[in-house]
Image (tube, rainbow, N blue to C red):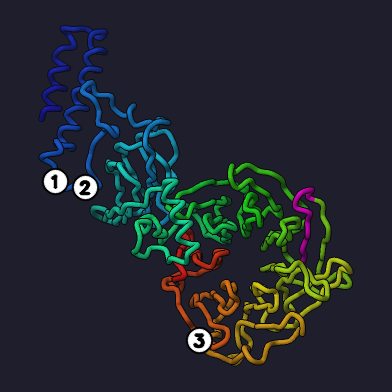
Amino acid sequence: MKRMFLAAFCLLLVPICGCRAMDGLKKDLDEVLQKMEMERFNPKEEKAPKESISSHATRSAEGVQANGAGTEGMQPQPWEAQYSLTINPTPEKSIVKLMNIDEEYFPGIKLSAGYYEVMVEHKGYESYREWIKLDKNKAIKIELSHAGAAKVSVADAPQKTSASTQVKKAAVKKGVPQGTEGEESAPGLQLPDTLTGHIDSVTSLSFSPDSTLLASGSYDSTIIIWNLTDGSIVQKMNHGDKVRAVSFAPAGDTLASGGNDKLVKLWDSKTGKSINTFRGLTDRVYSIEFAPGGQMIAAGGNNELILWNSSSGKIEHHLVGNVAPYPRFGTIKCIAFNPNGKDSDGYMFAFTTQPGIALFNPQNKEVMILPDATMPASVTYSPTGKYIAWGARHQRSENEYFPRLLKVAAREMDAEISRDDAAAAADRVFYTAYAPGGRQLIMLSYNQAVLYDIKTGAIIRKFPGTSETAVTAASLSPDGKIFAATAGSNIRLWTMD
């Protein structure tokens, strides 16, 4: 009613004051209406009930002054406290915008304390548009409805400070599970359950050597580097085409990505800037792996593999299947370097092929095939390099055991730990990873992700939620404390308690 009265009053003044006077009047009127909106939707603190996520206001962190500063006070200033804001929408691929800032929204965006107008839209659903107050790190779940109001819930995200980061690292070294209660350092150790930021399927994951960062590649053509202390985005790079593989270098300062454009690109993981681009593959890049020292990088494609010098970009070896003396490789899904540099026979790394697992000797360019009719989809070395384990892309027999566990020195299966175990024979094992110590193995398939005890054959742990959607990639942190797996366009995280 007040709005209507003021508008009518303004119209009556037009013939009296003239257009020029009306410009100033309109400006004053806008300020008055703005103040009225704040008074209406943001009552005084002593009268306000418990804070709601949908509190309507246009004030900045310290409150808009009496002169009605409007949204100008919302722009982040370098001396102001910064908080992270993450919107987790349902459906996942909804459009998320912050209407009162120029910067494009992304999960974990850092903003000054204040009020922000959030809009979430998705075709076929009722849109959500509300003001929220940001005075701490927040993660907000917004579930849109086909008809009616959206369901909204808010949780405080742990604040990222240098002190809490130092405490976290100290706790990890002592073996303290993340998220457990204990000393004063306990707050801030909880991992985010889900990382949301890609708009298409996540295809590859890689942890940094110190286990504090996680890189993800996606069909949306982007690579995201995540900070695992609060789930925020550290860097976001555009590869230029669908990404199928990412890998951190052993030093952690470089990240490699490969995709449908047949290119392998190197990035500075701290700045997100492009360092180099490696060419040579004639088809899509399906796998990337750095050698233990970081001097070499291998990438597998369709029926070919290239080994580059990671500093100069020089091609050291180019293996092409079906060209003598090599058999047809098929799609090379996974590459694993021997942690010792090479084995006693000079074989430097293993990679999956259509006829089995291949070992490569760079000295004589020999490829040795360890036959497996199940078309392996994953391969990994044990921490000491004594064993090679791999999973199958297809099961040809119900009695075949997975994973395969081969003695590197003898080139034969270990009869003591290889068994026809129904619990271990998960269908289509396309990811295998040794936990530190070499006694446990993570296996990932469409049906389940499990932690498997190699000596006893027992399933130690199942990771809930991995069977809800097609899980196409996973990674275990180098310290063995965090397991990450894809869930469509999102990433799920678990602590290895």
- The three-letter amino acid code for the residue at tag 3 is Ala
Disc nearer the start of the sequence (2/3): 2
Q: Which residues are magenta?
A: 303-313
Q: Which residue is mark 1?
A: 49
* Quadrant position of the N terminus in the picture: top left
Image point (56%, 50%), residue name: 222
The alpha-carbon separation of the residues under discs 1 and 3 comes to 53 Å
Instruction: Please say whether residue 27 is visible from this viewpoint.
Output: yes
Q: Is residue 198 left or right of residue 26?
A: right
Residue 451 rendering spot, x and y as whole percentages: 51, 77
Q: Which residue is mark 2?
A: 52
In terms of depth relative to the viewer, which is nearer, 417 or 11?
417
CA distance for labels 2 and 3: 48 Å
At numbered mark 3, what does the secondary structure look like: helix, strand or loop?
Answer: loop
Q: On the image, numbered disc 3 is attached to which residue?
A: 458
Type of residue at label 2?
Ser
Element type at mark 2: loop
